[in-house]
Image (cartoon, grey):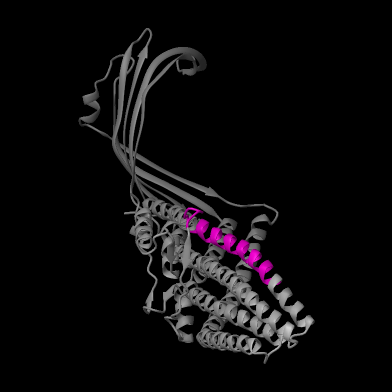
Amino acid sequence: MKRATIILLLLVLHQLACFSQGTIRLTLNDALKLAQEQSLQTFLNKHYYMADYWAYRSFKADLLPSVNLQATPLAYSNASQLRYNSENQSDEFIRTENLHSALNLNVSQKVAATGGTFFVQSELGRIENYGINDYTQYSSRPFRIGYQQDLFGFNAMKWQRKIEPLLFEKAKQEYLLSTENMHITTINYFFGLVSAYIQMEMAQTNIKNTENLLEVAHRRFELGTVSREELLDLRLSNNNAQINLQQAGLNFREAKENLLNFLMLPVDTELETVIPENTPVTEVDVQLVLEKAIDNNPEILQLEQNILESQRNVEQANKARHFQAGVDVSYGISKDDGNYLESGQLKDVYSPEFEDYQQLSLGINIPILDWGRKKGQYEMAKSRHEIVQVAGRQSLQQFKQNAVTRAIAFNIQKSRVESAALSDTLANESYELTMTRFSAGQADVLRLTSSQNAKDNARLQYINALANYWNYYFILRQLTLFDFESNNNIEFDEDKVLGL
């Protein structure tokens, strides 16, 4: 069984042990763990990273020596071919029939510093001719060593060595950032369900309270201490509470389905959400947030990548404007055996005496007239590079300001939660006293309705304050990729991601 399935099974069994009716008691930590283990976003994040992982592996492999074996086991030809006749000094079509085979082993190594390529080759060829003069000929080049180099040209490997490791490091940070973003989504769904449940619970409580108060109001109406207008207002409140309960039930169902779908749990699963009362981190160091955001956030690496790529484009456009040349030099040994008078032997082409094999080629490309096209490309690349630099500085400044603002905003969340909790307690006590005073004839319906609304609003404000605290906390984690509770960077576990 997969690890995510085992964790889910253990969680479900644990919760079923606590609730005989099969209701899962879901804490915020449980929801975060489930989302990280088995949500669709986790699946997508993993496969996005896998694509970047194999792209980097391909780049690393491209820096290592490559070995290639090319073979032509059989190549049969029976056709007329144009050949030169040295006796009468003319070209003639001569029908030939032959069987050709070839084998080539090539070992090459790219040189990133220069952009050139070293290579070592070993070749073997065989041709068997049919016709008036049947013969077999062998040709070998036991080894040939050489070097190919573009002179004064653009060295793509040099820039790849700078950019590719940056891209891979950014991929790791983007995976962690996506995970933290998934946590934020989980928090929103979790507290959305908490809020919907509390609103449904408040609607049920308000119906019970208004029904009890209606009985009291009817008795007081008969005694003349409650007016008919107040009695009608109370009946209206009771009717509105029933409407609110119906709507709250629909909202609760929708919020529960959203969370279950996101956590990949069966839609008929019953949940009991546990409101997190504790706030593990009360305050963060603003300077620490700024430092960690600059060190860990992939947006900073993206800015560096943009600058490097624009510098590469400028150099590439500049190199293309000027004189181009290339050199290909090689040295080796070779031997042929056999001709149209006598067939050769395979063993003979690998026995001394060998002949020297030397090759040197130099190619040049001189731009004479291109009507300013390459100069225009160079100037355009320069302009884009300047734009990237200016935009990068501005983006960095905005990024720093955002990090500081986020840290300051989080530092006031703790006090907001405490204030909201106090308001919730006071509003609830005030409502209880108001109901008692109304039953005793010391408060009117208007005061009762106002107190009830204040109680409900205070409760929802407390839940919203808690949700904001956790939302801001994980926004800081996403921004900095830093765990402020343990004071450690959020580490990327490649073995876990790759399933090793």
Residue 445, by quadrant, is: bottom right
Q: Position of residue 10 (x, y in %)?
A: 34, 58
Any magenta on residue 268?
A: yes
Residue 282: x percent and y percent?
45, 85
Task: Say above or below: 323 vs 445.
Answer: above
Residue in the picture at 52% in, 61% down: 259
**Hey, which residue is sitting farthest top in the picture?**
132
Q: Is residue 124 above or below residue 457?
A: above
Tell which of 61 and 83 is nearer to you.
61
Q: Which residue does the image show at 65% across and 85% down from the upper left?
A: 451
The range drawn in magenta is 240-269
Instruction: Please tell me which residue lies in front, 495 or 336.
Output: 495
- Residue 116 horizontal/vertical position (percent): 41, 52
The residue that appears at 39% across and 74% down in the rendered structure is: 489
**Of 374 and 330, which appears nearest the observer?**
374
Q: Is residue 339 above or below residue 324?
A: above
What kind of secondary structure does the magenta stretch mostly adopt?
helix
Res. 169 visible in picture: no
Please indicate, yes or no, whether residue 334 appears anywhere in the rendered image: yes
Report the quarter where the C terminus lies.
bottom left
Residue 135: x and y, percent?
Answer: 32, 14
Q: Residue furthest right?
A: 229
